[in-house]
Amino acid sequence: MSTDNNDPLHEESTQPRQPGSEQAMNRKPVYIRPGYRGSQKLQEKVALITGGDSGIGRAVAVHFAREGANLAIVYRDEHADAEATRELVEKEGVRCELFSGDVGNSEFCEQVVKQAADALGPLDILVNNAAEQHPQADITEIDNEQLHRTFRTNLFGYFYMMRAALPRMNDGGRIINTSSVVAHRGSAHLIDYAGTKGAIEALTRSMAQSLADRKITVNCVAPGPIWTPLIPASFDQDKIAKFGTNTALGRPGEPYEVAVCHLFLASEDASYITGQTVHANGGGHF
């Protein structure tokens, strides 16, 4: 794979920068490390990824595609980012279907899972990755609207997608939920967000027990500070400049450094792992 400035997996965009978009970042995330070779670990599997248009979700999509999976990517309304992800996925020689909508809407989740299964076949893998965060100085600044919106996307959306997917998922399938380091160490300025991530981990452990008889494993990946479009959309320039420097490795991670955890849990390599959390946090403290 090329790693020069013409590689869309690494290049700096020259398009106008919009808040929260890929173009808002000073540098592009790295979605797959140079020289990564697939080994068909997911050959002909069908995977559905929420929040798959950018950041960690895009990195997961590219890795799954390189390993042979056909993909359904669910995203909110970032159409340009989603199309860019589809282009990267299809370059790997697999199919990619895009679905735009709100995972916090249970009817949408039911509809999109049905459409994905009709287009690609029964699901083998579900990655719940869609999320939003809205930093506030303290709890008094979190109004009911923000609280409901954060839980609706980050927690209810995961529940809705699992409930919708399971009737159309093959036995022996994989469910991977994206949690966060803040589920374990908390966050004074992301109180509601941290609450959703802690709940996701408890939901994951419960679902792992519930689905053991179907040999469906359910696990979490808990990223630390990862360089994604969510960062410039959420923080001021001072915090962005310091982002990730308090980890043992002294830097933020790249999306590919998280996506390989999702790939591991999605593959047969993790067949005896369920109800667990993989921490990709650069040695961040709890």
Image (spheres, rainbow, N blue to C red):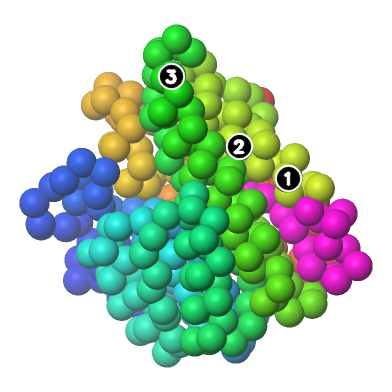
Task: Indicate yes or no whether the magenta region holds residue 284.
Answer: no
Mark 2 surroundings within 10 Å by alpha-carbon count, few (fewer than 14), some (14 through 19), many (20 or more): many
Q: Name the residue under label 1.
A: 203
Q: Can residue 106 be seen in this view?
A: yes
In the depicted structure, whether residue 250 falls above or below residue 122: above
Q: Is residue 256 visible?
A: no
Q: Report the magenta residues as a range.
A: 207-223
In this rendering, the label closer to the viewer, 1 or 2: 1
Q: Name the residue under label 3.
A: 142
Task: Tell me which label, 1 or 3, sits earlier in the chain.
Answer: 3
**Percent x, y for residue 235?**
31, 28
Of residue 70 and residue 2, the one placed in the foreground of this image is 70
Q: Are marks 1 and 3 in contact (CB under 8 Å)?
A: no
Looking at the image, residue 97 sits to the left or right of residue 172; the answer is left
Task: Tell me which label, 3 or 2, sits earlier in the chain.
Answer: 3
Secondary structure under tag 2 reads helix
Mark 3 surroundings within 10 Å by alpha-carbon count, few (fewer than 14), some (14 through 19), many (20 or more): some
In the depicted structure, whether residue 48 falls above or below residue 178: below
Mark 1 surroundings within 10 Å by alpha-carbon count, few (fewer than 14), some (14 through 19), many (20 or more): some
Secondary structure under tag 3 reads loop
User: Which residue does the image show at 60% across and 37% down from the upper left?
Assistant: 197
Q: Name the residue under label 2.
A: 197
Give the numbered dot on residue 248: none
